[in-house]
Amino acid sequence: MAEAGAVVTTVRPRRGRAVVLTVLKKVGAAAVVLWGAATVAFFAQLALPGDRATTILNIRAGQVQLRTPAELEQIRAQYGLTRPVIVQYLDYLRGLVSGDFGDSYQQYRPVTAIIGEQLGSTVTLSLTAIALAWVIMVVWVTLTAGRGPRVGALGSTVDVVTAGLPAYWLGIILLLVFGLGLRWFPIISGSAPNGIVLPALTLAIPLAGFMAQSVRTEFERSLDQPFVLSARMRGMGEWGIRLRHVLRHAVIPAVTLSGWALGATLSGAVIVESIFSRPGIGSVLVTAVNSQDLPVVTGIVTLVAVVYVAANLIVDVVYTVIDPRLELS
C-alpha cells in the first residue's frame, strides 16, 4: 500500500508539470501567431504603391492633388516616416503591446477610440450568432442523428451544404425572402432589436452546419454506448436519452470549435454588417479600406487576430486543465 501511495504521489506532480509545460507552449505559440499577424500588417503598409505621406494628405483633403515638398516633409516628420524601417517597426510593436494603434488618417482620432465605439455592436452580433448556431445544431443533430440510413444521410448532406454557404450569398437570400418578401424583419438592421436576427442567422447557419459535422459522429457513436442501453432498461424515453445523456457526451467537439467560432464570426461580420447596413467594426473596416486609412485597417485586423488566438487559447487551456489526458495521451 505504501508503494502504491508513493507511485500516485510521484505521478501527480509529473502530470502537473506536464500540464504547466503544455499551457506555456500554447501561450508561446499564441504569442508567435500574434507577432506574425502584426508583422504582416505592418509590412503590408510598406508594400503599398505610392508615397505614404502623399496618401495621408490626399485622404485628409478627400481628393488627389499635387503636394509641395514642405507639406510632405511635415507629414513625414509627424508620423515618423523618415526614420529607418526597423525603428518604425519596433515603435509599431511597442504601441500594439501598450494598446496604441495610432491615429486615423481620416478622422484625426485614436484608432482605439474608433474601434471601441463600434466593437460592442459586433461582439453582440457574434455572440448572438454563436448562440443561434448552437440551438440550430443541437436541434438538427438530435432530430436526425441515429435515425436510420436515409434520415442520417439527409442530416449529413444538410450539414455539408450549410457549412459551405457563402455569407454574402446567404445574407442576400435571407434579406430578399424575409426582408423584402415577407417583411418580417427590417431591410436595414440598424440598432433595432429585431434587426439583429437576419445578420445573426447569416453567420449562424454555416457555423451550425460546420459544428454539426463534428457532433454528429460523436452523437451516433454515443448512442451505441452501454450507458444508453442502461438508460433504456430503466424506462427512460428516447428524447430523454438523447438530450440528457447522449448530447452531453457528443457536444465536446462543438465546445472546442466555439473558440474558433468567435474569431470566425468577427471576421464574417465584415461582410454581414455591410449587407445589412449594420453598425460595427466590419463597416468601419470597409470604410477604412476604401479610404486607405491604414491605421484603422491594421488596428481591426490585429484586434480580430487577438480575439481569434485568445479564444482558441482559452479553450485549449481549459481542456488541458480539466482533463490532462487529452495532452498526455
Image (cartoon, grey):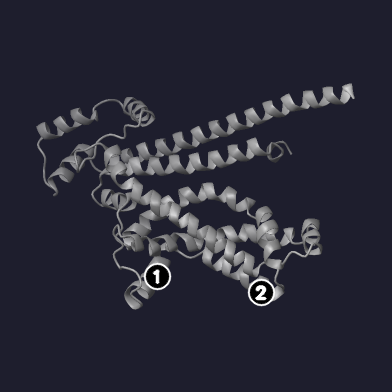
Cα separation, mark 1 vs mark 2, equals 26 Å
The residue lying at 27 percent from left, 39 percent from top is 113
Is residue 134 toward the left or the right of residue 39 in the image?
A: right
| Mark carried by residue 134 | none
User: Mark 1 — residue?
Assistant: 174
Give whichever of discs 1 and 2 has the lower sequence position.
2
Residue at the farthest right position: 1
Position of 22 relative to 150 (above/below) = above
The percent position of residue 226, horizontal first and vertical second, equals: 81, 57
Q: Is residue 48 visible?
A: no
Q: Amino acid at mark 2?
A: Val
The quarter of the rendered structure image containing the N terminus is top right
Is residue 218 toward the left or the right of residue 280 in the image?
A: right
Report helix, strand or loop for mark 2: helix
Q: Residues within 10 Å of mark 2 (few under 14, many from 20)?
A: some
The percent position of residue 231, horizontal first and vertical second, equals: 77, 60
Is residue 20 toward the left or the right of residue 193 in the image?
A: right
The residue lying at 36 percent from left, 70 percent from top is 175
The residue lying at 49 percent from left, 56 percent from top is 131
Total count of labels:
2
Report helix, strand or loop for mark 1: helix
The percent position of residue 301, horizontal first and vertical second, equals: 38, 44
Q: Which of the 4 image quadrants contains residue 54?
A: top left
Q: Residues within 10 Å of mark 1 (few under 14, many from 20)?
A: some
The percent position of residue 284, horizontal first and vertical second, equals: 29, 50
Closest to the observer: 106 or 65? 106
Is residue 50 toward the left or the right of residue 247 in the image?
A: left
Q: Is residue 280 visible?
A: yes
| Mark carried by residue 151 | 2
The residue lying at 19 percent from left, 42 percent from top is 107
The quarter of the rendered structure image containing the C terminus is top right
Q: Decide: marks 1, 2 in contact (CB < 8 A)?
A: no
